[in-house]
Amino acid sequence: MKNLDKILEKLLHNVPVTSQDISYLLQLTHPEARERLFRAARLLRKRYFNDKIFLYGFVYFSTYCRNNCTFCYYRTSNSACIRYRKTTQEIVDIASALAESGVHLIDLTMGEDPQYLSNDNEGYQKLIEVVKLVKQQTNLPIMISPGVVPKEILQELKRAGAGWYACYQETHNRRLYDTLRLNQSYDERWSIKVFAKTTGMLVEEGLLVGIGDSVKDAVHSLQEMKKLGAEQIRTMSFVPQKGTPLYNAATINNRYELNVIAVMRLLFPDKLIPASLDVEGIEGLKERLDAGANVVTSIIPPEAGLAGVSQSTLDISEGYRTVKGITPILEACGLTPATLEEYVSWMDN
Ligand code: SAM
Ligand code: MD0
Ligand code: SF4
């Protein structure tokens, strides 16, 4: 425990730690040691965010995708999944309902749907229009997760009202990346985020774990995330998907994800770190918050015919993935939802 206390002490006092220290924390398995790790993470969350939690509404408005990521249910060659594409009006209505329910941000996410990402520009204009209308109707901050788009389009999306660009590398091990995001350029995916930052957009970077990644990979990823300067960083455990090559590859063990969340909080105390409802649903929320997360993502309105990315149906129609559904859990963790003003002022700082 001595080593653990020393490392945590350093992190709590803003003293730099080594790669070995980070690797040690990521690999903790003893319950008592992990509890100390989580406690330190919560301490920093309190110091930087005063236990206020941000709530993100999630609108997965098209599940059509031209890509073939091996981990994803919506990869183009999965004929087993049910696909949908919401109309612009439906998207605006869903976003408005989410806004009314009390979320602080609308995350507009899609597969790399050729109808939006078409080269003739018509599709891009449709996407820009969606952002504009959602902004007009809700007046909330907007995050877009459309996959890789051309630079000039990203600028237009920003002008239309998108303050955030989310695009996850999943791993910063290029060899592993090539086996996950088939035929997608690592550098192109990375550079669009670097570009987004230069336009003044806020950026979210993400790490997928339990997908053939090593602890060394995670340490490296955390360093890359630092370099990028992303304002929001996340990790999610890989959830095996029916009809995909990795269906039989692994089973969920959230322990490692929780360690990564806590280590993220310790290394990036002032950044936003999500607890996603999309990995283990409402059941998994408390643990993720207890590990130091300060954003709840994947809040989805019931009965709107929407899906999650890694849990396509879990807890959605029952209405558990709603502001009302998660409120008792926030309370149980001693946390409170931030006000919209608090969120916006964080974004502006
Ligand atoms: N299509 C866009 C893209 O790939 O950037 C945005 C949506 S994509 C579905 C959003 C993220 O969901 C992926 O980057 C990945 O991190 C996560 N994801 C997809 N399938 C997953 C799975 N089976 N388990 C865990 N996370 C998954
Ligand atoms: C989430 N399922 O927040 C969503 C998704 C995309 N920007 C976010 C991964 O958990
Ligand atoms: Fe398409 Fe995104 Fe899924 Fe990859 S992760 S297949 S880009 S929806």
Image (tube, grey):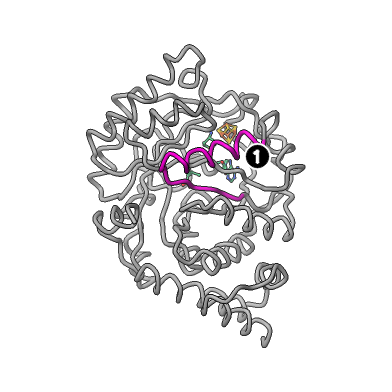
* Residue depicted at 58% across the width and 37% down the height: 191
Label 1 C-beta lies within 8 Å of the nearest ligand 1 atom: yes
Question: Split into 4 quadrants, where in the image is the N terminus?
Answer: bottom right
Amino acid on which disc 1 is placed: Phe
Residue 51 found in image quarter: bottom left
Q: Residues within 10 Å of mark 1 (few under 14, many from 20)?
A: many
Q: Is residue 224 magenta?
A: no
Secondary-structure class at tag 1: loop
* Residue depicted at 50% across the width and 63% down the height: 288
Residue 262 horizontal/vertical position (percent): 55, 67
* Residue depicted at 61% across the width and 43% down the height: 169
Q: Identify which residue, 199 or 236, lies in the foreground.
A: 199
Looking at this rendering, what residue extends furthest in the bottom direction? 2
Q: Tell me where the magenta segment starts and ends, as one range.
A: 186-207
Q: Is residue 95 left or right of residue 272?
A: left
Residue 142 horizontal/vertical position (percent): 35, 41
* Residue depicted at 34% across the width and 27% down the height: 130
Residue 55 horizontal/vertical position (percent): 35, 53
Q: Is residue 48 left or right of residue 70?
A: left
Q: Is residue 189 magenta?
A: yes
Looking at this rendering, what residue extends furthest in the right direction? 175
Residue 79 found in image quarter: top right
Q: Is residue 238 left or right of residue 89?
A: right
256 is higher (above) or lower (below) than 311: below
296 is higher (above) or lower (below) than 156: below
The residue identified by callout 1 is: 71
Q: How many marks?
A: 1
Residue 177 horizontal/vertical position (percent): 70, 41
Question: Split into 4 quadrants, where in the image is the C terminus?
Answer: bottom left
280 is higher (above) or lower (below) than 176: below
Looking at this rendering, what residue extends furthest in the top direction? 120
